[in-house]
Image: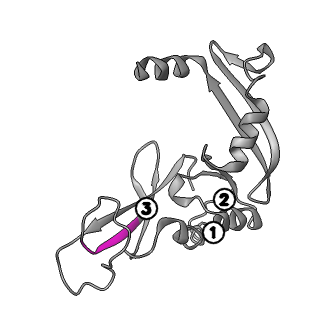
Amino acid sequence: MASDYLAYDVTSFSTFTKGLEDFEWGYNRDKEKLPQINFGCYHAFRTGLPLFYVTYPGSIVDKSHMPYIMSYNNELDINNVIFILANAFHSTKNIFWLYDNKIKYILPIYLAHRSIKNIIDQVRDGITSIRYRCTDGVFAKTISDRFYGVKTNIYLYYSTELLESSRLDLF
């Protein structure tokens, strides 16, 4: 495959039409009370042009579809990549699947997750040390630990500018 960044996105289409096989009731992102079909598409990030798409029944949630779409990677010559996954693909099962298949990934973390709260509590007081400064007002620290049972690097960032902006919004 040509050297480009790829994006995989999922969207759904709802319909009033009756009798279409893949239009099913399920979680509806748009909160419409209609059956839907899901549409997953790889596209070139720079051009936005589609490279590959697949439709699947509207009752299937994104996170359960991830291993299925990843099965196309060999056919599409998608290899030696790092997948940046949205929260829709966040599940313990998917993390284990990616790890077992030696697929590199970046996944946002939930600040409400107990393990993440514990990690933040461990670094909270020292993160604004000059040692962790990246740029003006931004500090970062890497934590190597097991997360969801998988050896993981967790990158925590702290921004004094965002903190101040949030504080001003509160008032």
**Which callout, 3 or 1, points to the residue nearer the camera?**
3
Q: Is residue 57 left or right of residue 93?
A: left
Q: Is residue 23 left or right of residue 164?
A: left
- Quadrant holding the N terminus: bottom right
Q: Is residue 87 magenta?
A: no
Mark closer to the chain start, 2 or 1: 1
- Between the residue at mark 2 and the residue at mark 1, the CA separation in whole angstroms equals 7 Å
Q: Circle 1 — which element?
A: loop
- Between the residue at mark 2 and the residue at mark 3, the CA separation in whole angstroms equals 17 Å
Q: How is the image coloured?
A: one colour
Residue 124 position (above or below residue 32):
above
Query: x, y percentage for residue 72?
Result: 56, 70
Q: Tell me the number on the disc at residue 74.
A: 1
Q: Which residue is mark 3?
A: 41
Q: Circle 3 — which element?
A: strand
Q: Which residue is mark 2?
A: 79
- Between the residue at mark 3 and the residue at mark 1, the CA separation in whole angstroms equals 16 Å
Depth check: give the residue in front, 144 or 72: 144
Identify residue type, mark 1.
Answer: Asn
Q: Quadrant of residue 137?
A: top right
- Quadrant holding the C terminus: top left
Identify residue type, mark 2.
Answer: Asn
| Residues drawn in magenta | 34-39
Query: x, y percentage for residue 48?
Result: 39, 48
